[in-house]
Image: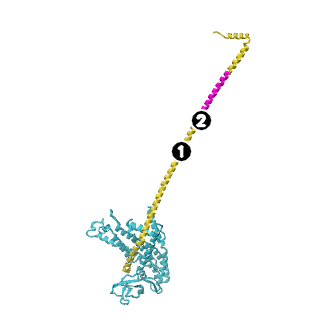
Chain colours: A cyan, B yellow
Amino acid sequence: MKELIYNNLRKGLLVIAILSSAMLSPLFANETEQKSTENGKEAEKFNAGEMIIEHIIDNHEWHIMKIGHTEVVVPLPVILWSDGKLTTFFSSKFEHGHASWNGFKIEQAKENKGKIVKVIGDTMETDKSAALPLDLSITKTVAAMLFSMLLLCIIFLYVARQYAKKRNEAPKGLQNALEVIILFVRDDIAIPSMGPVKYVKYMPYLLTLFFFIFFNNLMGLIPIFPFGANVTGNIAITLVLAIFTFAITTFSGNKAYWTHIVNAPGVPWWLKIPVPLMPIVEIIGVFTKPFVLMVRLFANITAGHIIMLGFVSLIFIFGNMAPALGYGVSVVSVAFAIFMTMLELLVAFIQAFVFTLLSALYIGMAIEDHGHHEEHAH
Amino acid sequence: MELVSPSIGLIFWMTLAFSLVLFILGKFAWKPIMSALNERESKIQDALHAANKAREEMETLKFSNEALLKEAKDERDALMRDARKVRETLIEEAKLKAGEEADRIIESARASIEYEKMAAITELKNQLATLSIDIAERILNEELAKSSRQDEIIKKMLEEVKFN
């Protein structure tokens, strides 16, 4: 009983610690976002929808801001595989979509908008007959993702060294802060889902997964240059994460797991024999689980970004009507954006937690020993 | 549409990077961290166990100490009680003996006084007898110097004798 109370207390403290530690950064982060957007949208007519989508989707260059008429962007490498040929150059050659290079350009409209397509000769005309080149460019999301991976490696290799250096000593600083979360993943995600013995094998995956999602969620909330990309709100990223969970679940599934899918015990025979209704449902379930994982994380993080950008956009929509109105609305907008950022901090943790917990549960179900009892979690 | 259609390039880089990071962190970060955590936890557990054991030992030690103390106290009390008893009996005996001795001394003193008294009385009697005989002799000598007086006494004596 006492242990239980202690455990809950610890969980509560963890949430409070995460909230309060990150509380200061969004305050000024929002201000910067507002300012940068303000600078970028002086002359043109402001289109909130376009601006929001532009911020959320992937891009071949990393747009920082626009000062006057000069765009401040970080050019990123474009890597194309087309007709058995590898082409690499920097995205600055496209001049923000206004030029073609090496027979390629960024499509500006229609169904391929934003993708790199082939052009006829050196013109800007799309070559409709040619297939789309295989685009392996380091886009904004790839760059942000690689940066977060680098950060993960640096931080955790450093922490691991701290552990090696000060064996059996009390943890300190960064090591201490991360140890709380590592223990949270172990004691509240892995062990309850997989049992106290089998969890060990899956800990590296669960920890990497958790910290990758958590770090990227938090980094997405910081709107200054190396951060602010919508990594975990990109469906390709969540797809890969879900595929990892799916692959691990499928490859570690034991006999009981497969038996349960093909011939679920405790189900009336007529649900299986003439029409294999239950097996079909179970097999669909195998795929819906990772699919739901993918969509949940993507939708949550993207929605958070959309709401935040929406509040900021309000300032400019009203500002376009009358500057005074814009300033008036900005107070309310910034207040709401701050509130949303607080909420997103919570969401950043919760989504990382949910993704990891469900992954652990799915893997746990696949490796569970059914033994003498039939009942198990669905 | 672009929002929900995953791009091949991103999938490629993500798979590559994630696998790589999973491998690097799994080998060089999570493994040492988890083992260090487990080691520390078991060490703390051991320390707690040891502390508990030590406390229990202390408890039993204290308990046995208390028992020992109590025993010693009891023994001392018993000794004291015995000693007191012995003293009392000794005093009682001594008193009794002293009384008896006193009685005996008094008794013997009384006996010797009695004896001395008897001796003195006998002595006195003897001396008185000697004195009486002396006086009687002298009186007789004086009285019986004249014959008339002798006659008178004889006569008187004879008169006193009655033959009935």
Mark 2 — on which chain does it sit?
B
Q: Amino acid at mark 2?
A: Ala
Indicate the secondary structure of the residue bearing disc 1.
helix
Name the residue carrying label 1: B79
Q: Quadrant of residue A257?
A: bottom left
Separation of residues labelled 2 and 1 (CA atoms): 28 Å
Residue B146 appears at what percent x and percent y? Answer: 74, 11
User: Looking at the image, which is closer to me, A250 or B89?
Assistant: B89
Quarter of the image with the N terminus of chain A in it:
bottom left
* Residue A230 visible at all: no
Indicate the secondary structure of the residue bearing disc 2.
helix
Q: Is residue B98 left or right of residue A129?
A: right
Residue A284 appears at what percent x and percent y? Answer: 32, 72
Quarter of the image with the C terminus of chain A in it:
bottom left
**Within-10-Å neighbours for mark 2: few <14, some 14–19, many 20+:** few
Name the residue carrying label 2: B98
In the image, residue A173 lies in the stretch drawn in magenta? no
* Residue A71 visible at all: yes
Q: Amino acid at mark 1?
A: Leu
User: Looking at the image, which is closer to me, A142 or B127?
Assistant: B127
> Magenta segment range?
B102-126
Q: Quadrant of residue B126?
A: top right
Which SS type dominates the magenta stretch? Answer: helix
Residue A348 appears at what percent x and percent y? Answer: 43, 73
Dot 2 and dot 1 within a common chain: yes
User: Looking at the image, which is closer to me, A73 or B112?
Assistant: B112
Q: Is residue A289 left or right of residue B105?
A: left
